[in-house]
Image: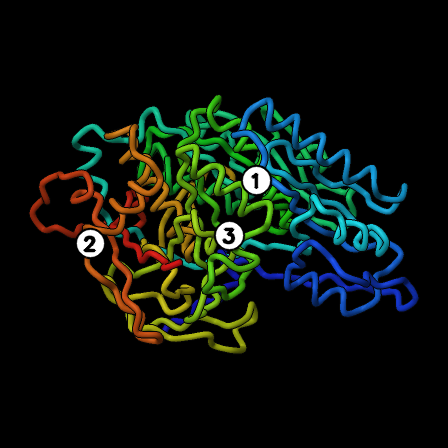
Amino acid sequence: MTCWPFGRFATLGVSIAVLAIASASAAQPTGSSHARVGPRLAEALLDPVSAEGVAVRVTLKRDDLDPPGPARRASVRERQDRILGALAHGTLQMKYRYESVSGFAGRAQASAINALLRHPEVTAIHLDYEVRGTLTEGVALIGADSAHSSGLTGSGVNVAVLDSGVDTDHPDLVDDIVAEQCFCNNHPSPIRGCCPAGGLQQSGPGSAEDDNGHGTQTAGIITSAGVVAAPGVAPDAGIVAIKVLSAAGSSFASSVDAAFDWLVTNHQALGVRVVNVSLGDGGEYNNPLASPCSGTPAANAVALLHAAGVAVFAASGNQGHDDGISEPACIPEAISVGGVYDAAMGPIGWCGNSSCTTVLCTDVSGPDVFVCHSNSDEILDLLAPNWRTITPALGGGVAQFGGTSASSPYAAGQAALLLQDDPSLQPEDIRDLLTENGPLVTNADNGLSFPRSDVEAALGLPEPSGTLMLLSGATFLAVLGRRRYAP
């Protein structure tokens, strides 16, 4: 049996580091509150709040706001000013003031948390926890070659990739980069950032330069030109690279919130119709209407993008959960993606930690076999390739890449093909097309089956002889699938 560690290879999944609250003498938030408190923040507040405060993500009232645009941004700013003006000076250090999403993130002392909880325009407060991208190996299960042959290559469709950035000089990606942006904070301090220039936020050329590799590999699955690695799923699609992960593959959730907020404001001008998020918090959530799948700035932003016709794809996570998927995949409007094998590779064991001293799960691999480390539940939408994909890597070369970090961009790339074919498609149309044309794949651990769709069938293209083509190391789109949640 071959064993593969999650920590050795650039793997997906996001681990949570619950913030330590050190001081036993500081006051605790007390009394009745208007706002909902996220579960991680509630746990953190069981201990006294230190003098430095707690890193929080704050969601403000939004139902009375205009649709995204100048009027909404002005109203959000006014609401932020009112709430911040009600706090005692120096009790909150700001990280990000969102523009279109009604909220902000910062480090709040106990008195500020008390005031925020009671303010009638604050609807929820969540902990700003650490996120870390991790991944496994993956191989492409081919389904896009017929689409390419028919002239569908993603041309005219731009995909935003929230990740560690992109190697802007890579020959497979250099012609695909439409725009660069960074929101990156890898330290609890509101001052220290991990954007290339050292701050929390950066715009323009060079602002999303990859120093980890995860983002380059993710983007390569979508749109590799085929110069070094094989062609991507949508090789002529554009990439809007948004750096939210540091060189160590870590950041805080507020960085992801800020990136989503920036897309709500700028997606139309940039021509973004698809978003890929190959990261998550490692949690196990099965209720998309409960926190943290709803009520966070990220959840509100994804809902706004969905309403604007932008499809958001998110990896389900690699923790082997059988009763839930990670955030942001669990957000109702997101299209969540788990993983399948494409071929028989023999018995495969997945390590439960970076040193491989424990085994998370073991598979007997084969075509259309569910990958045991892939998080799943009834709210999981679809499946895509997860094993040994050869994709562009830092320095102009290639690397093996996989896990649900790879599965999600396979699905996002297919969406780009569908949108080139029919630009009028809305996110729900895309979800339906990706989930109604393929065989069901069952997770033996929980008995649930998830469709893996066929892009040829979704596009109404004739099937080539041999139906399934296996091309080791290719980054073509594979066959996908979906399972809808029931509210």
Up/down of 39 relative to 172, above or below: below
Up/down of 105 relative to 352, above or below: above
Where is mark 2, residue-wise? 438
Q: How far apart are the alpha carbons under marks 1 and 3?
A: 21 Å
Q: Secondary structure at mark 2?
A: loop
Quadrant for residue 222, please give it: top left
Q: Depth check: 329 or 245 in front?
A: 329
Q: Position of residue 148 (x, y in %)?
A: 22, 33
Looking at the image, which residue sits at the far right?
25
Quadrant (top left/top right/bottom left/bottom right) for the N terminus: bottom left
Q: Position of residue 446 (x, y in %)?
A: 35, 74
The residue at the point 18 percent across, 38 percent down is 459
Q: Depth check: 181 or 291 in front?
A: 291
Badge 1: few (under 14), some or many (20 or more) residues near its Cα, within 10 Å?
few
Where is mark 1, residue-wise? 63
Q: How far apart are the alpha carbons under marks 2 and 3?
A: 25 Å
Badge 2: few (under 14), some or many (20 or more) residues near its Cα, within 10 Å?
many
Quadrant for residue 443, please give it: bottom left
Circles 1 and 2, Cβ within 8 Å, touching? The answer is no
Where is mark 3, residue-wise? 328
Q: Name the N-terminal-most of marks 1 and 3.
A: 1
Q: Name the N-terminal-most of marks 1 and 2.
A: 1
Q: How far apart are the alpha carbons under marks 1 and 2?
A: 38 Å
The amino acid marked with disc number 3 is Pro
